[in-house]
Image (cartoon, grey):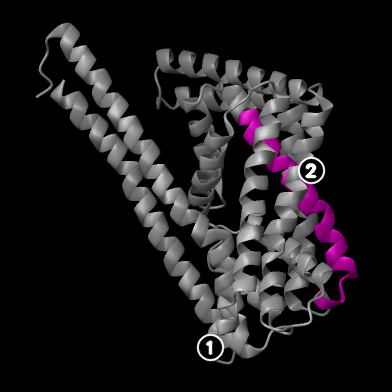
């Protein structure tokens, strides 16, 4: 019993250490990206502008943050409603911040989806349905971004003649085909994915990395959850139209509010803002961030943002706007998400201790 307890503590500690390492990497890369802007684009010029402390700006920032966080929660909430599940919105609100934290401390935002599925499972949503909901949530956002980005690259004057755009344009077609192709297989040809995963499991078993019993168990669970996922997507398509429409509407509202922060900052600093141009630049920036291998696209997002906005912003404001943009959209949510993650993990540990205490009471075994 003591060995089991020690093993559980070691297992729970290992992901914690990884999160700490990824968080440190995120901070280091973010600092490196900011330094690149400071040294390469801002002419080593930085000054804080107290106009960002004006009550009018602070009120606007609070309102935009509320829209941003609420729409983020509601887009998943209504996706789940279309799937026939109703999770209390207070729990969805917590999930918003947990997702922001995990998606920014794991490479290519892989941890965000896993964290959401883990959280939804804790609140009674089946694994296949939780996977379908988080995948559909991502597909809706990707559909908007991948539709708007090509138009921005072709028609936006602010993006013409830039070396980085040539490289993005070359990658754009490849990534669109691969990304949308993957989701098309997942959503409409689930049996193809089952065949692929079956082959992989068989190869792992032949390599003697898992035994026959575990292979059989994993095979059964994989087929069961993939089947549930496929059915869940069908349920979404046939679900109440109002919930489908609301999930799409709040996805669009989420993206627009997310991309509006630089315009708000620029307006507060006295710039003549072309709002549509700012939205277009942020669509392309976010497209690049989707494929950045660093945690939360740290370093890369700052660099791309600095590249796009350096002709628009004065050298003294470029670093300020970049840091303020990242703080409002990412760092603030990560801080709240870290606290809420600790609360959830503490609840898990408390439940395990209570379950262990009940087991001890039944069996009379002393875990020490």
**Residue 169 picture location, percent across and down:** 79, 64
**Residue 41 picture location, percent across and down:** 62, 86
Instruction: Report the front residue among 330 and 17.
Output: 330
Instruction: Report the front residue among 53 and 25.
Output: 53
The answer to whether marks 1 and 2 mark residues whose Cβ atoms lie closer than 8 Å is no
Q: Main secondary structure of the magenta part?
A: helix
Q: Quadrant of residue 3?
A: top left
Give the labeled residue for mark 2.
Answer: 249
Tell me if residue 178 can be seen: no
**Residue 158 picture location, percent across and down:** 82, 77
Verify whether residue 157 appears in magenta: yes
181 sits to left or right of 202: right
> Circle 1 sits in a helix, a strand or a loop, which is it?
loop
Instruction: Report the front residue among 235 and 10.
Output: 235
Give the labeled residue for mark 1.
Answer: 47
* Residue at image coords 68%, 58%: 258
* Residue at image coords 48%, 74%: 32
Which portion, as a residue range, is magenta?
A: 131-158
In the picture, the quarter occupied by the N terminus is top left
């Amino acid at each position: 019993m003591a060995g089991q307890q020690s093993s559980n503590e070691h297992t729970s500690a290992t992901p914690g250490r990884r999160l700490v390492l990824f968080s440190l990497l995120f901070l280091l890369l973010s600092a490196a990206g900011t330094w690149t802007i400071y040294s390469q684009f801002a002419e080593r010029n930085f000054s804080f502008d107290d106009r960002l402390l004006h009550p009018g700006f602070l009120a606007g920032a609070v309102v935009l943050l509320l829209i941003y966080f609420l729409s983020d929660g509601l887009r998943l909430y209504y996706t789940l409603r279309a799937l026939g599940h109703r999770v209390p919105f207070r729990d969805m609100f917590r999930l918003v911040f947990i997702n922001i934290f995990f998606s920014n401390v794991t490479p290519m935002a892989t941890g965000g989806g896993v964290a959401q599925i883990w959280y939804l499972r804790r609140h009674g949503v089946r694994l296949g349905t939780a996977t379908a909901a988080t995948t559909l949530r991502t597909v809706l956002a990707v559909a908007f971004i991948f539709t708007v980005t090509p138009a921005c690259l072709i028609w936006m004057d602010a993006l013409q003649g830039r070396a980085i755009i040539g490289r993005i344009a070359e990658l754009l077609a490849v990534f669109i085909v691969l990304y949308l192709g993957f989701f098309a297989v997942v959503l409409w040809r689930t049996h193809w994915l089952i065949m692929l995963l079956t082959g992989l499991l068989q190869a792992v078993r032949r390599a003697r990395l898992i035994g026959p019993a575990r292979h059989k168990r994993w095979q059964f669970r994989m087929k069961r959850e993939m089947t549930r996922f496929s059915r869940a997507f069908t349920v979404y398509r046939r679900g109440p139209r109002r919930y489908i429409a609301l999930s799409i509407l709040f996805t669009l509202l989420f993206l627009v509010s997310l991309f509006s922060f630089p315009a708000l900052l620029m307006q507060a600093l006295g710039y003549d803002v072309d709002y549509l141009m700012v939205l277009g630049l942020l669509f392309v920036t976010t497209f690049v961030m989707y494929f950045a291998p660093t945690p939360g696209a740290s370093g890369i997002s700052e660099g791309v943002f600095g590249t796009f906005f350096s002709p628009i912003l004065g050298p003294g404001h470029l670093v300020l706007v970049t840091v303020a943009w990242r703080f409002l959209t990412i760092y603030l949510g990560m801080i709240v998400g870290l606290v809420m993650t600790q609360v959830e993990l503490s609840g898990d540990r408390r439940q395990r201790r209570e379950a262990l205490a009940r087991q001890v009471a039944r069996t009379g075994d002393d875990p020490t």
